[in-house]
Every structure is written in structure tokens, then in C-alpha cells.
Image: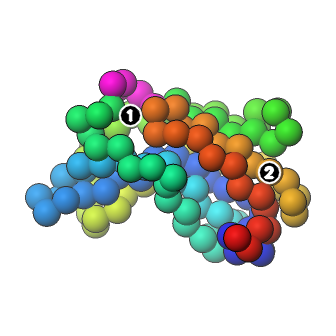
Amino acid sequence: MAPEARSARVGVAALAGGSGHASAYTPACLWLDEAGEPVELILGPVLTTSDELSTDVLELSTSVDDEENGHGRVEPDHDWLVSGPGRVRALLPVATPVLEADDELFVDAGELGTYEVRVGSQV
């Protein structure tokens, strides 16, 4: 992660196949610097095909030290995700507060998985 990252926007990215329509989904985390400018986009840790999803709404949450600091929802069939421009499209409804260096941000993307990342980590 970029060392200047201080907050995040978390959501879902859709990856489009040859037809241009979304064929798989993955968690997405856009890291922002102190001025709110994007510094890094992290995708993953898993890729789930659209036919593997068993829900119409993906619940997302973020937390630090077991205290939730963000919550949101994404509908995988949202027009932007399904057929928007580009091969990778994301909806990022969860905004974290400013995080401190070494905070461990836990991301729960429901069916798409969970992961944890340390703010400022270079691994």
C-alpha cells in the first residue's frame, strides 16, 4: 500500500469479459491520501463469477480494532457494474474515516470474502 494512504473507499469491482458485460466480481479498496486524492487501488483477494453469487445485494463493512467505521451495500446487477465503460468498473459506497499509520483495516465484503490490511504497510 502507498505510504501516504490515510483513508479508503471500499466496495465492489466488476470485471468484464469479451462481451463487455460483467462476468466476475471482487472486493475493491481505493486508498486516498490526506487531501482525498487517490493513491492506490487494491482488488481481491478473490474473484467470484456472476453465476456463483447467491445474493442480490452485497453487504460491505470496514472496521479497525473490532469497531465498525463504515457500512454499505452494492447490487451486483447495478447498471454501472454490469455494462458501464471499461473492463474494470467499481462502486465504492463505504468511506472510512481518516486512519492512522499502522491501523489494521478489516474489510468484510460478504460473499466476496474478507481481508485485513495495515495502513502504510509495504508488503
Q: Taking 113 as reference, is 32 above or below it?
A: below
Q: Residue at x 24, y 58 (%)?
A: 16
- Give the left or right position of residue 44, taking residue 18 as reference: right
Residue lying at the far top of the rendered structure: 55
- Amino acid type at circle 1 is Glu
Image quadrant occupied by the C terminus: bottom right
Disc number for residue 109: none
* Amino acid residing under circle 2: Glu
| Dominant secondary structure, magenta | loop
Q: How many marks?
A: 2
Q: Nearer the viewer, residue 14 or 81?
A: 14
Q: Is residue 91 visible?
A: no
The residue lying at 80 percent from left, 51 percent from top is: 104
According to the image, label 1 marks what residue? 75
Residue at 60% from the left image edge and 71% from the top image edge? 40
Question: Picture coordinates of residue 61 (x, y %)?
Answer: 63, 35
The N terminus, quarter of image: bottom right
Spatial separation of the CA atoms under disc 2 and disc 1 = 27 Å
Please report contact status of discs 2 and 1: CB closer than 8 Å, yes or no.
no
Relative to residue 53, is residue 103 drawn left or right? right
Query: Residue 56's quadrant in the figure?
Result: top left
- The residue sitting at 69% across, 40% down in the picture is 62
Q: Position of residue 14 (x, y in %)?
A: 35, 52
Question: Is residue 17 found inside the magenta-colored segment of the image?
Answer: no
For label 1, count other residues whose C-alpha is less than 10 Å away and answer few (under 14), some (14-19) or many (20+).
some
Foreground pick, 71 / 105? 105
Q: Is residue 101 above or below residue 50?
A: below
**Which type of secondary structure does the marked residue at label 2 adopt?**
strand
List the residue tagged with mark 2: 104
Foreground residue among 7 and 110: 110
Read off the magenta span: 54-58
